[in-house]
Amino acid sequence: MIAAALRSIAGMAVLLVTLSPVLAADDYTLGLSDTIRLKVVQWLPAESDFKDWSSVGGDYVIGPGGKAAIPFIGEIAAAGQTTSALAATISAELKQSLALTTAPDVTIEVSKFGPVYVVGDVQTPGEYQFAPNMNVIKAVGLAGGERHGLTAQLGDKDFLTAQGNYNVMRQQWMRQIATRARLDAELAKATALPVPAELANVPEGTSMIAIEKAVMDADLRKASAQRSSYADVQVLLNQQIDTLAQKKAALEDQLKTTQDELNGVKSLAGNGLAVNSRVSGLEQNVSNLTTALLDIDTATLKAKQDISDAVRQSSNLDDSNFADLTLQRQQADAQIAQLTVQMSTEKALIGDAALASDAANRPASSYQYTVVRDGEEITADETTALKPGDVVKVVLVLAQ
């Protein structure tokens, strides 16, 4: 009975290999990013039956470190091993970690291979799924083939697009150059705005500088108007202070007269020669005049504070303008640097487009293939076999 069961298990293993839609490939060496499908079966002698370990079985990805994380075992080195060797290792590890009397039967299949990468002169560079028996020409085919299908019309279109983008960026760059020149002039408190060297031989350079000069003149007028406004405020406040001083002097004279009169009336009242009502009336007048003088002092103090504020704001005007101009200068520099890099990129694209257009009419051109594997570049041809993780570089070599 046991022999029959063992034959049954062996038959099932053969059936798994025969009917599986994925690759068993015992001679295949596993690599990074491969996905393995694990199936574990244990024979139970007491029951003359086998048990499927579904909790352990399943798909596992070989990570960047070359290891796969297996339940009850942990991470185990997988990259560089064949499926049969890895299956034997996992079987032994499971037996040891679970203290089994017999090792379970482990079957490993490759359910998904790691990708290959195709770069260079192909229609669609990118990442593609590896398949058994893949070679360079098959990978290039997945990437749409070499770019020998380019036409002069396509090259011309790319050239015009890149040229248009470059022209737009150059216009923005020149405007930023003009803006920076204006900011430098304003920071230096200059009234003239010379044409910078970058725009000296550019036809539209003069008009760009003229626009920035108009902006600079407007800024100067605005600053002058602000200073004049602060000065006018100071003049008005000083006039108000003078008026308050005159009013105060008059009230002080009136207060002195009233106080003298009050003192005389109090003396008469003490001798019974004046009524107390007159004394009360004079005391009220003295109180009112004193309050009015205090109000004048308060108003005078407020006017002086307003003058101080106007003087301070007028003094801070230059500092505020300097800070704003410095910030704008930094932003202009950043824009110029960014546009310089972008224009450099567009110039390279213009060259590539021109090259593609020229290459379309040069049938003598050829392609060179290189495979990068484990950090090493390998000269290849169309029939060179590939492995998962390989990078296929396709380079168009133009005929001289």
Image (spheres, grey):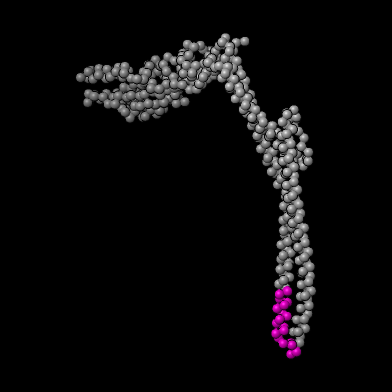
Between 77 and 146, the one lying in front of the other is: 146
Q: Is residue 380 above or below residue 91?
A: above
For residue 286, which quarter of the picture? bottom right
| Quadrant where the image shows the N terminus | top left
Residue 336 in which image quadrant: top right
Left or right placement of residue 78 versus residue 210 in this view: left
Q: Where residue 38 sits in the image (x, y, percent)?
A: 35, 24
Q: Nearer the viewer, residue 114 or 185?
A: 185
Residue at x-position 36% and y-position 18%: 24
Q: Report the span colored magenta.
A: 269-289
Q: Quadrant of the C terminus?
A: top right
Can I make out residue 315 in this image?
no
The structure residue drawn at horizontal position 67% and vertical position 31%, both measured from the top left corner, is 171
Q: Is residue 13 above or below residue 199?
A: above
216 on left or right of 26: right
Magenta: main secondary structure equals helix
Q: Determine the image quadrant of residue 243.
A: bottom right
Q: Nearer the viewer, residue 32 or 112?
A: 112
Give the percent coordinates (x, y) of residue 73.
38, 28
Image location of residue 252, percent across then percent down: 77, 72
In percent of the image, x 74 and y 64: which residue is there?
A: 300
Q: Residue furthest left?
A: 1
